[in-house]
Every structure is written in C-alpha cells, then in structure tokens.
Image (cartoon, helix red, strand yellow):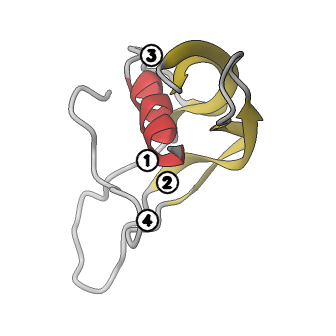
Amino acid sequence: MQLVVMVTVLALVGASNSCSFGCSLQNVSIRVESCGKTEYVYTTVCEGQCYHEDPVYLSATAVTEHYICNGVWIYEDKRIEGCSVGVTYPVAESCMCTSCNEDNTYCGRLPGSC
C-alpha cells in the first residue's frame, strides 16, 4: 500500500509545470483507499528542480554528477471511519538537492521537464 501512495505522490509532484529551480516542501492532497472507502489526506512532498549543467566536453574519465530534489521522509497512518485497516502515507519533513543514486533512482531528464 505504501508503494501505491508514494507513486501517487510522485505523480502529483510531476504534474506541475513550474520551471524554476529549487527544492522545497509543497502541500498536496492525496487520495487514499481502504475497505472500499476513499478519503483525502493532506501531506507534504518535495518538489522542484536542482540546478545542473551538462559539460561541453564529455570525458571518459570525468563523471558528471546529477542532482535531484530529495527529502527526508516519514510515514503516518490514517484511519478511515468504519474501517479497521489503516492506510500508511508518506510525509516529507525536509527537502534538499542531493546527488542522484542510479542504483535506485532514474537520473535522466524526465519528459516535459525544463
């Protein structure tokens, strides 16, 4: 369930058309579902773009480091009235530009990005 909620949050963040640089907390409303009932929860996500310059000359020895908007995340639980199963959703506590880890993150340019 956490994965589904996290994908929803990331999709909402990617839906914005802002082309400014910076990485910051943004308030969003996400839909959660449990026991066939749906509610909305308000949470925070990391949103923004981190400055990056592609080198003019690509070297076989020099590694170009990519930076992404990343955050410190915790998870909170929400109980939907009339349902005994809670829903866990992500909450960003802080955001910063960090070096992209290609082991667990796509570090290329996203379609439609600035």
Residue 70, percent from left and from top = 59, 48
The residue type indicated by label 1 comes to His
Q: Which of 72 and 39 is in front in this view?
A: 39
Instruction: List the residue tagged with mark 2.
Output: 67
The Cα atoms of the two marked residues, 2 and 4, are separated by 7 Å
Q: Which of 6 and 65 is in front in this view?
A: 6
Nearer the observer: mark 4 or 3; the answer is 3
Residue 78, percent from left and from top = 72, 29
Q: Are marks 2 and 1 in contact (CB under 8 Å)?
A: yes
Query: Sequence-wise, which precedes: disc 3 or disc 2?
Result: 3
Q: What element carries label 2?
A: strand
Q: Is 103 situated above or below 7? A: below
The Cα atoms of the two marked residues, 3 and 2, are separated by 17 Å
The Cα atoms of the two marked residues, 3 and 1, are separated by 16 Å
The residue at the point 60 percent across, 13 percent down is 40
Tell me the number on the disc at residue 52: 1
The residue type indicated by label 3 comes to Ser
The Cα atoms of the two marked residues, 4 and 3, are separated by 23 Å
Q: In which quarter of the image is residue 85?
A: top right
Could you tell me if residue 93 is visible in this image?
no
Q: Nearer the viewer, residue 74 or 62?
A: 74
Q: What element carries label 4?
A: loop
Tell me the number on the disc at residue 18: 3
Q: Is 78 situated above or below 51? A: above
Tell me the number on the disc at residue 14: none
Nearer the observer: mark 3 or 1; the answer is 3
The residue type indicated by label 2 comes to Tyr
